Image: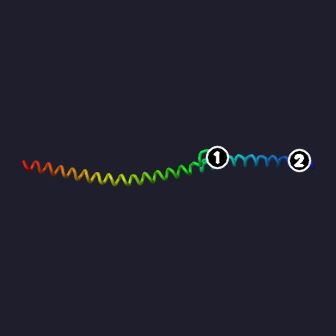
């Protein structure tokens, strides 16, 4: 082999080493992203995706609770209104009797 071929072969080997190093770095980054999104054995597979599912379930529960509370508030308004009307009627009757 001539020196030109040796130099060219060295350049190709260096290029392949750099490509392999970049690939290893990308694999590490992708692994970190995967661990963040879906979790790993170390964090009990609780990543962002499972956290979002839990938050979504909590929001649904809160929306259901809000609907129930709205029903109770309407009923309480009706009862309080009825009590006020009854009290006004009692006061009116008491003042009319005297």
Mark 2 closeness class: few <14, some 14–19, many ≥20 residues within 10 Å: few
Mark 1 and mark 2: span between their CA atoms?
A: 39 Å
**Which mark is drawn over residue 6?**
2
Residue 9 in percent (x, y) is at 86, 49
Residue 1 in percent (x, y) is at 93, 49
Q: Residue at x 11, y 48 (%)?
A: 94
Residue 50 in percent (x, y) is at 55, 51
Q: Residue at x 53, y 51 (%)?
A: 52
Q: Is residue 55 left or right of residue 68?
A: right
Question: Which dot, 1 or 2, sits closer to the camera?
Answer: 1
Q: Which residue is situated farthest in the right direction here?
A: 1
Q: Is residue 24 left or right of residue 54?
A: right
Q: Residue at x 91, y 46 (%)?
A: 3
Sequence-wise first label, 1 or 2: 2
Q: Is residue 64 left or right of residue 23?
A: left
**Which mark is drawn over residue 32?**
1
Mark 1 closeness class: few <14, some 14–19, many ≥20 residues within 10 Å: few
């Amino acid at each position: 082999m001539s020196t030109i071929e040796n130099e060219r072969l060295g350049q190709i080997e260096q290029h392949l080493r750099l490509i392999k190093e970049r690939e290893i770095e990308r694999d590490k980054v992708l692994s970190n992203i995967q661990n963040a999104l879906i979790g790993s054995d170390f964090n009990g597979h609780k990543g962002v995706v499972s956290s979002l599912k839990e938050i979504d379930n909590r929001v649904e529960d809160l929306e259901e609770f809000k609907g129930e509370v709205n029903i109770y508030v309407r009923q309480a308004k009706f009862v309080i209104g009825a009590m006020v009307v009854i009290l006004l009627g009692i006061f009116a009757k008491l003042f009319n009797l005297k």
